[in-house]
Image (spheres, rainbow, N blue to C red):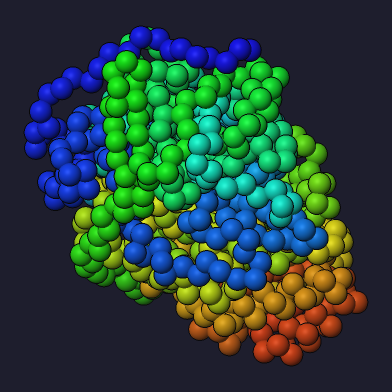
Amino acid sequence: MTQLQFAFPSTPVASSPITPEVVAEHGLTQDEFQRIVQILGREPNLTELGIFSVMWSEHCSYKNSRLELRKFPTTGPSVLVKAGEENAGVIDIGDGWGVAFKMESHNHPSAVEPFQGAATGVGGIIRDIFTMGARPVFLLNSLRFGPITEPVPSAWGTSTPSAAEIATNRRLFAGVVSGIAHYGNCIGLPTIGGEIYFDPSYSGNPLVNVFCAGVLRHEQIARGAATGIGNPVFYVGAETGRDGLAGAAFASRELTEESKEDRPAVQVGDPFKEKLLLEACLELLAIDGAVAGIQDMGAAGLTCSTCETASRGGTGVEIDLALVPQRERGMNAYEILLSESQERMLIIANKGREADVRRVFEKWELPYAEIGRVTDDGMMRVRHGTLGVVAEIPARQLAEEAPLYKPAAKEPAPAPRLKLADLPVLDCHESLLRLLAHPNLASRRWVYRQYDHMVRGGCVVAPGSDAAVFYVREADKFLAATSDCNATFCALQPRQGAMMAVAEAARNLVCSGAQPIAVTDNLNFGNPNKPENFWQLRECVEGLAEACRAFNTPVTGGNVSLYNESPQAAIDPTPTVGMVGIIQEEKHITRAHFRDAGDAILLIGSISGGLGGSQYLLQLHGRKEGPLPRFDLKSEIALQECVLALIRMGLVKSAHDCSEGGLAAALAECCFVGPALIGASVALGTRNLDRREDDLLFGEAPSRIIVTTTGANAAAVLALAQARELQARSLGTVGGDELVIHTDTTRHAWSVAELHAAWSGALPALMD
């Protein structure tokens, strides 16, 4: 393929005056406009106003959240690239290898076009990883939708979702899953885990958070800085079109029925072209001395990549839009600069190495063009052929000096408090079946059967266990990864809910035999200019920060997605936690399901439950009420250290976290998340506990792990746990074809086949 030298003819941007109405249409305040005038020493033209509108949008600048993000721990001996320095953080995993990983959102686009919104979200996060010089190895996702089945009538006050709303939520769910599967499968990356929840707060406001991890040698870390005065700037990848126009600004305002018609703000992806781009970029980066800097054209497209590389390098960049490959006729400067067309990169080559760039991209049959050069004046200067200079802005002030705000915060009215005396005890046999059949607990096989989780041959623990485990052949390392957040907990008590999200993610990794090493996050909230919303954000950030410090898991980066709000309401606060761990030896890999008949079942942690915020209370009683069960970081860390030590000693055959659905649901999942169904008989021995039966079975107290071991090792496991001052008890034995739970007064028995049918058949029945 020859280098593209010329694009279609362009038309100038209309020279209409910049009125207050035009400024407001660009999402800028009058104070921000005056700040722009001061920076430029003159009024901006329309193209420059568009540039500032996307770069100073919440999506790109984090102007309402950046001060809060400074509370996160971001350093440590294993941190090779810390949060905020580059496109993704990098953590040392030993022997000269590092893992780059990050989570991003594509929420608003997925509400408008679920397939393309989700697909291009996957494409964007993959580019963030290979921009670092890392080869992407696997994907996760965290998804939230409105109800896809009719809830208990009183669950949400006086209103329940209409049939039309439920149909819309199912359409969004199906479209998002299909988009994720399409992009990941086509590019050849396995999607090996994730989470999905359904709640009315997400009706019309789905959350699509996508995660990617890649591996690289320490010396392969690439930087996104425009260094070397006079170095050539190359545009590589797909041609620029009008799709995704001003998508960053679109993602920085509330969703309305009118904004959902803003389809030009949704990008269109091509995973096959991205695969070529990935291979071409990694090949070019492997050529010693060829590349000075590299940057993905993500949010804000060519604008962002140009000014950010210049800012990081302390230089300037000058480009000519007439040289940019374009796939549509008549695109003006505003459109070319603000387009978020996918599968594009900006490469700063070292002078004299232009031939390397041309050779590699011609080999992979990808468009490319030399569009500019690095300058020494600190300016982002944009020319457009014979039209001359169409934008000239100080790069650092554009990229790094957006206004920062500290919105007002106001604690909302206290969440309703549960009065157990007023709560009827439901039939426990039927309750477990109903919980397992609810979309929040049911098998996700309908989802992950659409994902090719076996491509690359590295998935050791497939979707369905507490955490996914992946063998990275290049590094001879076993990585575990998970994403977690209980948004109901965060809605009821934001700070504690966020702390519990970090703890659950770490607990899931430990149950898989991994030592947690670092965190990425995706902070999903409503409009920050509403004091109650910002209070939730602040509380959640402080909860995440405290927990990450306690677990010694630095935050390597992530994403803030605000304005997740419709005219009806904001979403529940959803600070999603993506966490990665490392497994020292293959023999330590642990799965959630029961293994062999006769194994002893033990509970490490308190048997006590707590119905506040539970799925039992929410889905079967229709009440979203607190308080949450008691949570203590010190006890949680002691529990995890104990279980990980037991795994490494070879004393644990299976381990499963107790979370949604409580102890009864966790025991049921242990019976059938493996390759075969197997029963269990347990006795809770609750005579001295002042607890209701439904509380014991379905309460969701944290810091509890069900483990199995051989009968001969059971006493040793209990003794080791108790020596660490942890509560631990024998529950029973694996075997049979029933799950039997004895309390002091009642014997409950379920056929494992019956439980499995309820759990495995729910989503197919709703979606197929």
Viewer-nearest residue: 734 or 294: 294
Q: Residue at x 36, y 38 (%)?
A: 380
Q: Which residue is drawn at the image coordinates 73% and 83% (left, top)?
A: 721
Q: Residue at x 36, y 65 (%)?
A: 68
Q: Residue drawn 46% across and 68% down?
A: 72
Residue 145 in view in this figure: no
Q: Position of residue 320 (x, y in %)?
A: 40, 24
In this rendered view, identify the residue nearer to me: 419 or 368. Answer: 368
Whole-percent x and y of residue 308? 43, 44
Q: Is residue 564 left or right of residue 568?
A: right
Q: Is residue 673 left or right of residue 396?
A: right
The answer to which image quadrant residue 348 occupies is: top right
Between residue 720 and residue 554, name the one nearer to us: 554
Q: Quadrant of the N terminus?
A: top right
In the figure, residue 96 lies in which quadrant?
Answer: bottom right
- Which residue is outermost to the right? 712
